[in-house]
Image: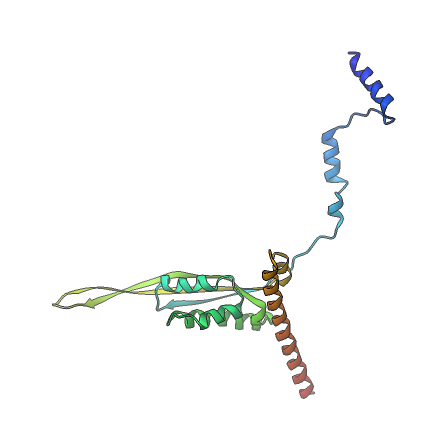
Amino acid sequence: MLQRPLECESRVSLSSAPCVAVNKRAMSSTAVEGVAPSGALDEPVVSREMREVVSRKNRIRMSPWKINLLTRQVRGLPVVEALMQLKFSRKQKGPPLVAKVIQNAANLANIRHNLQAEDLMVAEAFVNRANIQKGIMFMGKGRFGLKLRRYSHVVVRLKEIDFEGSLAACKNRFQRARWETRRALADKVREAREGDGARDGSGLA
């Protein structure tokens, strides 16, 4: 019973600070409720909600497996680069169909939100299986088989590009240079568009 007061007296003699019992639970609650850490005093970063549009094309006369190869290719790319990839694709029938869906979504974003193609990226692009029509496949020697005509639904969701967030998430200088080039192109097209609008307005005046 006498050891604790002696220990407290020895501590007082060595250090001028008094021996005070601290409740850890109370201290933690005080730190959470009252005092904020030094890093939390900075202003919070408010992320702006990115605008998006959705376009879909139903009953495309093509197999879902074939169109899925194209949607996987353009998923996550900016709209300009996605259209360029589809333009130079070696596939014959699928690229124009997927490019038309992406272009329709870009036109819809321009009408609703006044966004240009350089400000958009393909956030989602996927294929759903539609109905399957069955027919007769005639073969030699009087035989016949079953022919399947597959249809597909294509859905594309375009989202506004967050250039600041993309630049902050870059892991190396090559990715940063790529995103800086994309942002410069978008700014250039936007300035040209605003200049044309101002010129048209002055001409009407």
Residue reaching furthest to the front: 173
Q: Quadrant of residue 68?
A: bottom left
Quadrant (top left/top right/bottom left/bottom right) for the C terminus? bottom right
Between 114 and 178, the residue placed more toward the observer is 178
Q: Would you say 14 lies left or right of 94 here?
A: right
Between 172 and 110, the residue placed more toward the observer is 172
Q: Would you say 59 lies left or right of 140 here?
A: right
- Residue 170 in percent (x, y) is at 60, 57
Q: Would you say 12 lies left or right of 1 here?
A: right
Residue at position x 69%, y 85% from top? Answer: 202
Q: How is the image coloured?
A: rainbow
Residue at position x 74%, y 31% from top? Answer: 26
Residue at position x 35%, y 67% from top? Answer: 62
- Residue 111 in percent (x, y) is at 57, 73
Q: Quadrant of residue 100?
A: bottom left
- Residue 152 in percent (x, y) is at 37, 64
Residue reaching furthest to the top: 1
- Residue 124 in percent (x, y) is at 49, 61
User: Is 165 above or below relative to 191?
Assistant: above
User: Is 5 above or below relative to 107?
Assistant: above
Task: Tell how many labels.
Answer: 0
Between 201 and 182, the residue placed more toward the observer is 182
Quadrant (top left/top right/bottom left/bottom right) for the N terminus? top right
